[in-house]
Image (spheres, rainbow, N blue to C red):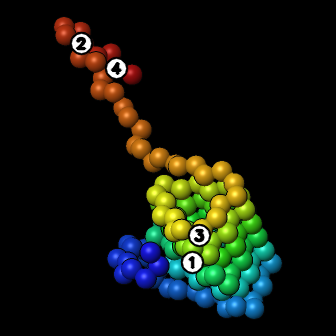
Amino acid sequence: MLNRKRTERSSSSHDTSLIARGTVIRGDVRFSGTLHLDGRIEGSVQAEESGAVFTLSENGVVQGEIRVPHAIINGHVHGDIHAAERLELAPEARISGDVHYHTLEMAAGAQVNGRMSHQATEAPRELPAPMLSGVEAVPA
């Protein structure tokens, strides 16, 4: 799950940011590219682009909401997770909050204490306009 080679996402930024072990951030964090957290964030984590990836190591802690397209969680989260595309829960993941995902991969040992909700991203369906024979369309 975590060791598999990933294909590069089409994002405008392929930068990786690291928040090291022992670092505590109090406040909301917004990022693009990839964010790897070994430390602690007391606030929300939010991606600013569609190809962003958030990775939480086994040492990392988030006390707040996470809103990202792709998340790989192996640490502790005290808050809701919204993963628009993919959520990977590794064996040491401990989630206290609701989990909203489109695609989920969960390893044996991962724990979620909250509701799990699949979010379908179907395109809205439009019905074709009815064909009226012998009637002209009225201009709007």
As helix, strand or loop, the secondary structure at mark 4 comes to loop
As helix, strand or loop, the secondary structure at mark 2 comes to loop
Residue position marked by numbered label 4 in the rendering: 139
Characterize the local packing of mark 3: few (<14), some (14-19) or many (20 or more) Cα atoms within 10 angstroms: few
Q: Position of residue 61 (x, y in %)?
A: 72, 77
Q: Nearer the viewer, residue 10 or 116?
A: 116
Q: Position of residue 3 (x, y in %)?
A: 43, 82
Q: Seen from this angle, which residue lies furthest right?
A: 26
Residue 132, numbered circle: 2
Residue 139 falls in which quadrant of the image?
A: top left
The amino acid sitting under disc 3 is Gly
The amino acid sitting under disc 4 is Pro
Residue position marked by numbered label 1 in the rendering: 55
Q: Nearer the viewer, residue 23 or 137?
A: 23
Residue position marked by numbered label 3 in the rendering: 109
Q: Indicate left or right for 129 with 14 as reference.
A: left
Tell me the CA gap for discs 3 and 4.
63 Å
Q: Residue at x 42, y 44 (%)?
A: 122
Residue 31, numbered circle: none
- Mark 4 or mark 2, whichever is nearer to me: 2
As helix, strand or loop, the secondary structure at mark 1 comes to strand
**Going from the N terminus, do you reach mark 3 or mark 1 first?**
1
Q: Position of residue 93 (x, y in %)?
A: 62, 71
Check the picture and name the quadrant holding the N terminus: bottom left
